[in-house]
Amino acid sequence: MEVNRLLKRNYSLLIKGILLRLVIFGVLCATPVVLAKTGTWDSPVLALLSVAGVLGFVLMAYRFPFALLSLRRCGKVLQEYPLEFRRGMSRKSESRTKYGTVFTVRVKADEPGGSPLLRAVDALERHRWPEGTEDGVWFAGDLPFGGVVVVPGSDTLLVVRPQDWDKFAREREQADAARVERAKRTLLAQRVR
């Protein structure tokens, strides 16, 4: 799997999504002004369109940096760790947070005891479960620290962390210096969202 193509595609999807939202929210903000200036329709109800447009801009400005940071983290992980094929990934639960939908998943591993529950968040902050995870996924990272899951076919990137971060504290502390340094370079060593 070509990492640069994968990252380029996800950045492209992010930019296209932002541009589409800019157009939609811009039209929502501009429509009442244009209609009022042309005298076509002058109603206080039209102000609601502007309010919706402004709220859309605010929410987009709030969430866009998180998506950029997630893609940056994915890029670092994918450059540093090799992709390993895992037999599948199953969704156990999901919850909505201010960062998007957080899935609790289990990535199948060949090692005994190597399938901890993980928290997964779509790097582009989408709320849907990616199709095709049952057939196998690509994993890059170090399970006690977290990593990135790539779903074949859709090229969806999921940032994953151990569900119970503290449970793996001992394993992270016992990791050799090279492993810890690698996790720090990829921004996996610290606990986040």
Image (spheres, helix red, strand yellow):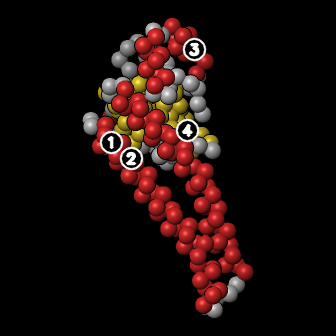
Callout 3–callout 2 Cβ contact below 8 Å? no
Q: Is residue 23 visible?
A: yes
Image coords of residue 50 (percent x, y):
65, 72
Q: Amino acid at mark 4?
A: Val
Residue denoted by label 2: 10
Q: Nearer the viewer, mark 3 or mark 4?
A: 3
Residue denoted by label 4: 102
Residue at 49 percent across and 48 percent down: it is 126
In three-dimensional space, the C-alpha distance between marks 1 and 4, rounded to whole angstroms, equals 22 Å
Up/down of 44 relative to 175, above or below: below
Q: Nearer the viewer, mark 4 or mark 2?
A: 2
SS class of the residue under badge 3? helix
Q: Nearer the viewer, residue 167 or 69?
A: 69
SS class of the residue under badge 2? helix
Residue denoted by label 1: 6
Left or right side of 161 for 9:
left
In three-dimensional space, the C-alpha distance between marks 4 and 2, rounded to whole angstroms, equals 19 Å
